[in-house]
Image (spheres, helix red, strand yellow):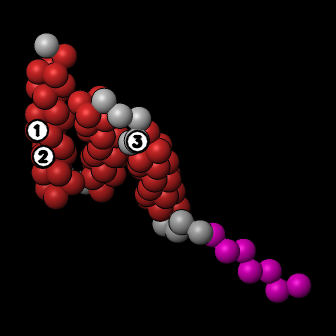
Amino acid sequence: MLEVIIQISLIAVSLSMLGLIYRVVKGPSIPDRVVALDAIGINLVAFVALISMLLETHAFLEVILLIGILAFIGTVAFSKFLEKGAIIERDRDNH
């Protein structure tokens, strides 16, 4: 029973990711695309977690952590770029 529920969840997450990919490509604005990319990262974590549950292994836990960290860093970088126009600010003082 649990295996069937996990498989249905995998299909739902996959369909959600397809919708988010469409939003990244056709998004009306750049902030919408950034939010869709962040949601893709979250769905990717959920997908790997479901695969890990289906295979009954703990081997993918590090992968889940890595994907979560990379998605967070990417979202912060995109947000900073949208807010200030630069990701890395360099203050050049000529003293």
- Say which element carries label 3: loop
The residue where tag 3 is placed is: 59
Quick check: 81 left or right of 44?
Answer: right
Q: Where in the figure is residue 91, as x and y percent of width and height? A: 72, 74
Q: Do the residues bearing badges 2 and 1 touch, measured as CB atoms within 8 Å? A: yes
- Rendered image: mark on residue 33: none
Q: Residue at x 21, y 54 (%)?
A: 24
Marks 1 and 3, the one that precedes in the sequence: 1
Q: Separation of disc 1 and disc 3 at Cα?
A: 25 Å
Marks 3 and 2, the one that precedes in the sequence: 2
Q: Quadrant of residue 87?
A: bottom right
The residue where tag 2 is placed is: 18
Magenta span of residues: 89-95
Q: Main secondary structure of the magenta part?
A: loop
Q: Do the residues bearing badges 3 and 2 touch, measured as CB atoms within 8 Å? A: no
Which quadrant of the rendered structure holds the N terminus?
A: top left
The residue where tag 1 is placed is: 15
- Say which element carries label 2: helix
Query: In front here: 63 or 57?
Result: 57
Q: Quadrant of residue 92?
A: bottom right
Above or below 48: residue 83: below
Identified by mark 2, the residue type is Leu
